[in-house]
Amino acid sequence: MADMNTMQEILQTGDGDKLRELVQSALDEGVKPSDILNQGLISGMDVVGEKMKTGEMFIPEVLMSARAMGNALEILKPLLGEEGAAAGKVIIGTVKGDLHDIGKNLVAMMLESAGLEVIDLGVDVPPEVFVENVVKLKPNVVAMSALLTTTMPMMKATVDAIAESGNREQVKIIIGGAPVNQGYADEIGADGYSSDAGSATQLAKSYCVH
Ligand code: B12
């Protein structure tokens, strides 16, 4: 029998090859891809998130888990597509002037693993590039990351640019990154803020599932 607890444990060790094997054998046993995703991988990543908060796991280990999850997702992605379309579309990027992307990448991976379609615009993304992609891709959610106090104002500039383009009503805007908080989100007119990748996923999903 496929054992979801083992899957969660292997995810925490960051062993991508072993995790792929476990996912494949669960599929061979007839376990539904969405059950593997939710009970094995996402639950496993929840534990990783908790351990990160309590200081039991450090960033390099978290990244290894995230990468292992990415490996396993490669197997599941096409199969999940068969079960139902992505629950929503998110564009994500680190704002102009800011090159920090570890947190953004974690958030992007978690969103993907929650079944959302994620378009990653990368780092140093100017407001006009966010706007172009809102127009072109019509996402449900725009997610912005900033790690520097000097680049936080770019979040406001981006919210304003989206509003000026006439698309503000069509998207929800969420922000995150160490210097940012809920108060800042309110101040610049963003729809939401999350302090970590786990709650970012719940927030984004709440804006996607209709
Ligand atoms: C790694 C790092 C770097 C790396 C970045 C590598 C990379 N590929 O990202 C390098 C060495 C390149 C770097 C460069 C610089 N850095 Co730096 N860097 C850091 C460091 C040590 C860790 C950041 C990190 O990755 N954290 C781990 C991730 C997982 O956490 P996170 O990003 O906060 O993300 C989580 C949440 O915030 C949230 N989240 C993140 N994004 C989003 C988005 C959304 C939508 C949501 C909902 C949630 C969310 O979820 C994530 C996962 O839980 C921090 C110190 C620190 N402890 O934060 C300094 C820090 C951010 N850097 C700092 C500085 C000053 C710089 C430089 C200016 C240094 C210099 N003089 O050149 C340059 C700037 C370069 C630039 N233009 O961006 C300062 C910023 C000070 C400030 N208040 O502005 C810090 C705080 C260090 C310090 N104490 O001085 N840095």
Image (cartoon, rainbow, N blue to C red):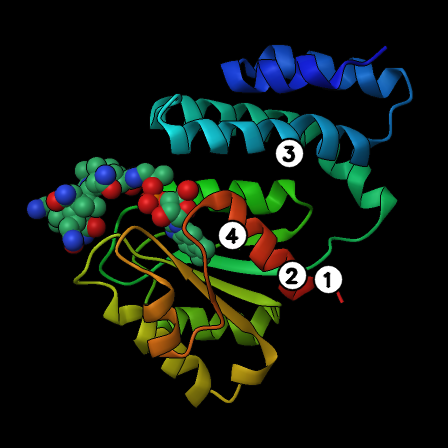
| Three-letter amino acid code at the position of disc 1 | Val
State the residue at coordinates (57%, 31%).
Answer: 45
Q: Secondary structure at mark 3?
A: helix
State the residue at coordinates (55%, 28%).
Answer: 47
Q: Are marks 4 and 2 in contact (CB under 8 Å)?
A: no
| Three-letter amino acid code at the position of disc 3 | Ile
In this view, which residue lies farthest toward the right?
30
Asked if residue 101 shows in the view, the reply is no
Residue 63 in which image quadrant: top left
Q: Is residue 26 above or below residue 184?
A: above
Q: Residues within 10 Å of mark 2 (few under 14, many from 20)?
A: few
Residue 209 has which mark? 1
Q: Residues within 10 Å of mark 3 (few under 14, many from 20)?
A: many
Q: Secondary structure at mark 4?
A: helix
Residue 206 has which mark? 2
Asked if residue 176 shows in the view, the reply is yes
Q: What is the CA distance from the residue labelled 1 to the residue labelled 3?
A: 18 Å
The residue that label 4 is drawn on is 200
Q: What is the CA distance from the residue labelled 2 to the residue labelled 3?
A: 16 Å
Q: Residues within 10 Å of mark 1 (few under 14, many from 20)?
A: few
Q: What is the CA distance from the residue labelled 4 to the residue labelled 2?
A: 10 Å
